Amino acid sequence: MSEDNNLPTRTDAAKSELRTLVTSDDLSAVDFEGPIRGLDTADTQEFYSAYERAFAAACKANDEVAQVVYRLLAQLCSMALRPSDPGDVWTPLFTMANGTRAPVAEDFRGEQTAILATVVGRIVSPVLKARIADIVWSNNRRDGVNAAAAIDAYCDSVASLLEGNLKPRFGMPATHEGIPALQRAMQIAQATTKRTRRPEKVERTFETFYVAAWEHRDVSSFVSAAELALWYGLRKPDVAAAELEAVAASVPAGTFPLAVKRAWDLAARLYEKLNDREARQRCLIAAVEQTLAMREQVKGSAAAEASWVTEALQQLRHVEGMEDREQSLEVELRRLQKASLKQMGKFDIDLQLGDSREKIAEHFAKLSLSDALRRFALLTRSRDPARLRDEALNVAKNAPLMAMMAGVHVDSEGRPESRSTGAPHEGAPDPTWFHRIIGQSERIRRARTVAGAIDPARLEIQARFGITERHFSAIVGLSPFIRDSQKPIVALGFARFFQGDFMSATHLLIPQLEPCLRHLLKINGHDPSKRRDDSTEEDLSLSGLYLHFRPELDQILTPAIAFEIDLLFNAKPGPELRHELAHGQISAAACFDADVYYANWLIYHLCCLLIVQSWDELVAPRLAEAE
């Protein structure tokens, strides 16, 4: 086994000097169960800690044989057993960013496994015996003797938990602690015996466990056991469904609702397979009521209560004859959503503008009209998407808990309009996560740009030149960004923007972005339209353009500009300004929001960007006449 897989402890230096193979003589020379003798737990992590302490003591005593034995047993006890994992049931204690990890079962294949196989019969602790025998069998599937030993030991562990001889972790019910051991015993039995000749001990242990979960009304463990029984053929669907319904209906008050819901849901699925529509309907309704019972768990948080009502409404879509119930829940949902807006907190961000407004105003006070309008268009530039992604990943690195949280984004009435995922523990986050994290930082940047540069420059230009539509005839007329039929609308929009009439500017300019992008694609040889099944055609919407022509837009506009347009006008989560304006969701007050203000400037920026290199020859002379 590689030394890289040694568990980190205070005695790593000593470990690195030890031999890795533990021989039969080593295991005979050391009382290897000594460190765990007297531990009344089924938690192998406590065994791991005990063996680590024994290893440290052996290091101090300079006892090499004890060191290698206790190190091996610490490693064997460190890995987590996850029978529900379809890939590998053995999970390392840790995995480092560089790929280094703690040991797993396969690291001990070969000679070490063969040596371990010879000592299984000497082990007294059923928990340790089950683990060692299972690791041996996992590495050598032809070893039927240790497969049987693992099954017996797992069953003995479950029995000891139910009898109280072993204590569960964290004060959990014994039945809850026994599920992994019971499942693993059944897995090994299924893999090593014929269906008609399953070990009687497994069936007896299961029945004892099933009764114990029933008697203690441990509904969560009962459902898990029922799932195992169905999978391994120990219960027929009709019997299991009736038992699940009975235990769910008789749980004591205060039982966690989602645990009870699992029982109703499984019973409903079984009744569906049995084609018993009435019983399925009964169980589905009961499951919905458990979802609604979760409101009491989050009482006082209107947003959290609303999420459970929403979940219940989703479930009711599959239940017949509950229209009145749906209507009453819809009314409750709207009330909770509006109440949630009052409970939302807010915080102020210091944009730290310093004297930037004064400096911008002073700078623009010295410019001619032509220079002022050109430099106004170039006050900032779109940021590189790759850099923005890197910054977002740094957020995940520096604030991992915040990054792991998913997001629900609500509209002005408290209704969820989009959701974003949390960052996964491993691998890259999905696009909704990047849009959320990048969008948060970009919103602050846009606010700073508007307050510190765009607004003071606009005010200075307007005060000095009294901007009207005629000042934009040259700019709009020469820009290939705008098709001829839209030029008067855009010119009027720019004039209203400079004049401070942001409501008019917003409703004139933002709807023009979509036809402008289609126009750019057309003059670059692309056809941004779609053909319906009846052979009629229509232009693609903004979302359609980004779905079908994103590479082309990146090439025409640059990836940075295309990404900023997507982030501001199209993507979810985000301001979605094109969609919001098209559906009348931008209020009068929202027209003065920094995002909307910046969006109006961005359209001016795009209009000027395509003619800025020929500005002095073509635009400046005509602006000089207007000045």
Image (cartoon, rainbow, N blue to C red):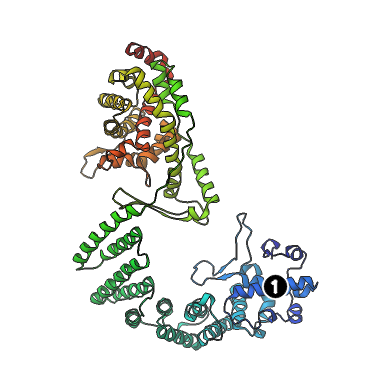
Residue 61 percent coordinates (x, y): 80, 73
> Dot 1, how many residues are within 10 Å of its Cα: few (below 14), some (14-19), or many (20+)?
some
On the rendered image, what quadrant is the C terminus found in? top left
521 up-or-down from 24: above or below: above
Residue at x-position 35% and y-position 65%: 299
Q: Residue 144 placed where, x, y %? A: 58, 81
Image side of residue 127 versus residue 560, left or right: right
The residue under the point 45% across, 31% down is 381
The percent position of residue 324, horizontal first and vertical second, equals 19, 65
Q: Which quadrant does the N terminus fall into?
A: bottom right
Task: Please tell me which residue lies in front, 253 or 514.
Answer: 253
Residue 332 appears in view:
yes
Secondary structure under badge 1?
Answer: helix
> What amino acid is labelled 1 in the image?
Arg
Q: How many marks?
A: 1
The quadrant in which residue 8 appears is bottom right
* Quarter of the figure with residue 288: bottom left
* Residue 67 image point, x, y percent: 75, 72
Q: Residue at x 73, y 68 (%)?
A: 20
Q: Relative to 246, is 382 above or below?
A: above
Q: Is residue 609 visible?
A: no
Residue, disc 1: 53
Q: Quadrant of residue 136?
A: bottom right
Would you say 484 lies left or right of 556 here?
left
